[in-house]
Image (tube, helix red, strand yellow):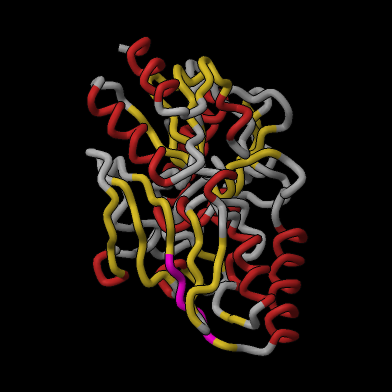
């Protein structure tokens, strides 16, 4: 079936690679090879790839910038569809409405909004991910979330059909959306912002970025916040209070700068990170009664 898929991809002029190392496509810099790695450069090609996977009964997953992913050492069986650089356009479609392709970096969208004096996106400045991934997990920080600004999406279903969904149907909650747990491919997102003052927006963006640089281990590979916020407390505080800053297995370490981050010091394996996450969760539960759940997506 893989040979038929490869031939079909060639016929449809869709570039692909075999045994692509996923560590080169995640911010954690961890992960073994994907059987087939595809980076479509149009929405039509995205639809076609998913349709072909269905026709040949080959499993697939969709990724963006890989900023919230932990890929296993043995890699990924099937097809990885990367909606990234080729699908990253940002454009103004109304006085206060932006359309972003799924691969657009949040920082680029923030700068585009700033250019047009649009406010509401500042919270996302410095989050190292793409727009599509941010919608899937309802990314948020510093009092803002994607649910506050998303007014609709276009996505591809498991049959390869292009669909639309409104903000009312997106079922946003903490680190959750309509797309959570589903094998759907977001291709574009509409954001509704508000007119603001350029200098005020720029000042807020600079302030939040400086706070991130001061508090987060941005100089080391990671997948961002490792644990979800437990009801009634904060993951980083619990981990810190249990004396786990700097706790290490192999090259996987609880950040000495921010206890909510697990970092890759150099050559951490997925098994190192998973064991570290388990041990930290067990220790925190034993000492505090809070059960930490991973925020990072494991594939």
Residue 215: x and y in percent read 72, 59
Give 161 or 189, whichever is nearer the viewer.
161
Q: Can residue 281 be spotted in the picture? A: no
Give 72 or 83, whichever is nearer the viewer.
83
Residue 41: x and y in percent read 51, 41
Q: Where's the C terminus, which quadrant?
A: top left
Point 25% across, 45% down: residue: 161
**Above or below 229: residue 18:** above
**Above or below 45: residue 114:** below
Write the start and end of the magenta stretch as one range.
190-194
Point 45% across, 47% down: residue: 295
Quadrant in the rendering for residue 125: bottom right
Q: Main secondary structure of the magenta part?
A: strand
Residue 136 is left or right of residue 243, and the answer is: left
Residue 248: x and y in percent read 65, 31
Q: Can residue 165 be spotted in the picture? A: yes
Quadrant in the rendering for residue 151: bottom left
Residue 78: x and y in percent read 37, 21
Residue 50 is left or right of residue 264, and the answer is: left
């Amino acid at each position: 079936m893989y040979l038929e898929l490869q031939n079909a991809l060639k016929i449809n002029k869709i570039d692909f690679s075999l045994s692509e190392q996923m560590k080169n496509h995640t911010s954690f810099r961890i992960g073994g090879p994907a059987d087939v790695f595809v980076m479509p450069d149009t929405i039509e090609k995205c639809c076609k790839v998913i349709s072909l996977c269905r026709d040949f009964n080959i499993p697939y997953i969709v990724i963006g910038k890989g900023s919230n992913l932990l890929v296993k050492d043995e890699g990924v069986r099937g097809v990885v569809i990367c909606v990234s650089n080729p699908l990253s356009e940002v454009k103004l479609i109304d006085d206060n409405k932006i359309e972003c392709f799924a691969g657009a970096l949040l920082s680029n969208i923030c700068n585009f909004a700033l250019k047009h004096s649009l406010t509401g996106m500042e919270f996302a400045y410095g989050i190292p991910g793409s727009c599509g991934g941010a919608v899937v997990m309802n990314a948020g920080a510093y009092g803002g979330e994607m649910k506050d600004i998303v007014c609709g999406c276009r996505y591809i279903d498991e049959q390869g059909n292009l669909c639309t969904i409104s903000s009312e149907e997106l079922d946003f909650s903490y680190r959750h959306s309509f797309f959570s747990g589903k094998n759907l491919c977001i291709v574009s997102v509409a954001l509704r912002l508000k007119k603001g003052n350029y200098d005020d927006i720029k000042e807020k963006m600079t302030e939040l970025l400086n706070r991130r640089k001061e508090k987060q281990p941005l100089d080391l590979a990671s997948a961002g916040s490792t644990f979800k916020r437990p009801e009634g407390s904060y993951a980083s505080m619990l981990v810190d209070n249990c004396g786990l800053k700097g706790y290490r297995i192999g090259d996987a370490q609880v950040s000495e700068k921010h206890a909510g981050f697990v970092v890759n010091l150099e050559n951490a394996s997925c098994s190192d990170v998973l064991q570290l996450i388990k041990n930290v969760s067990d220790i925190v539960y034993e000492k505090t009664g809070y059960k930490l759940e991973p925020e990072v997506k494991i594939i």
